[in-house]
Image (spheres, rainbow, N blue to C red):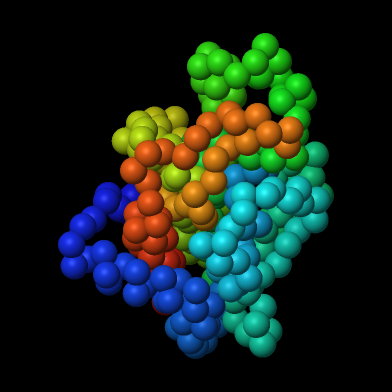
Amino acid sequence: MFLVEPVTGAIVGKIWEERKAISSFTKDFYDLITKGKLKIFVFGCAGTGKSTFGKSLDGQEDLARISGTYSLSSETEYYGLRDKRFVQISVPPGQTIYHARNWAQLYNALQQSERSIIINLVCWGYHSVERKDLGSISEFSSGVTDANQNLFLSNNRALELRTLDNLIPPLCNYQYPLHMITLVSKQDLWWKNRHEAQNHYENAEYAQKVQAIYTAKGHANFTHHFSSVSFGQINFDTADRHRLFETSAGYDNVVLTANFSNFLDMLKQLAG
């Protein structure tokens, strides 16, 4: 399921209870995996939230306390190694300059793993600029305008497609059955345009590229799923405090928790 729409009434109370389930996800997840070795590989462009995602699954990050500060990663990060048991979450840096070294290493690790889940993390173009001043972002050289905002998002969406192109060959060559999730992060920024975002991934060029993996591996050996989440409610600012995008009106912790819980349910089913 791509997203969970707003809910009201008695369901809200149940969702707030599920926040405890999210924060204790690591324990539940490890209890679920009782045999074999599972590796989760998280790919995606720089600034899509890969490190935050890894920390969230590893219990290091509380969704309610995420600040929005973006730490640039230059090395592959590993999560989920509690007690050195069954699950390893590998998160390579997203910057293109690191792909040849770090991504190639994980491609090799993927080929050697008999149980793997691939997560491709995208965010409909809202790639973080927390470490950049406004003047260093080419799309905003003439200021923050609607046209420049659209150009920034469009360029980043095109980069997501090119990054997926790099990921497809090693997935097609993987000799074992494979699960893949396209996880669209930063719901809090694109929620007001959520149906447009959903259509972008499910019914256009992105979906056509995923179909190439089905063609290579066959439906018996490959499954792909869409889901979307937010790791907080964070306005989109530059390092020098220029606001490029605001969080969507109407997006709240109830919607955040419902969608994160939906994603965890999917991940548990695939892992089991």
Nearer to us in this view, 142 or 108: 142
Nearer to us in this view, 31 or 17: 17
Please tell me in which quadrant of the rendered image residue 90 appears. bottom right
Res 38 visible: yes
Please tell me in which quadrant of the rendered image residue 107 appears. bottom right
Please tell me in which quadrant of the rendered image residue 130 appears. top right
Residue occupying image coordinates x 52% and y 20%: 150
| x then y, percent, for residue 24 | 49, 78
Residue occupying image coordinates x 50% and y 45%: 186
- Which residue extends farthest front? 241
Q: Quadrant of the C terminus?
A: bottom left
Give the left or right position of residue 30, taking residue 205 as reference. right
Res 166 visible: no
Numbered label tally: 0
Residue occupying image coordinates x 18% and y 62%: 9
| x then y, percent, for residue 163 | 62, 38
| x then y, percent, for residue 96 | 74, 38
- The answer to whether residue 80 is above or below residue 161 is below
- The answer to whether residue 59 is above or below residue 243 is below
Residue occupying image coordinates x 42% and y 66%: 264
Nearer to us in this view, 53 or 200: 53
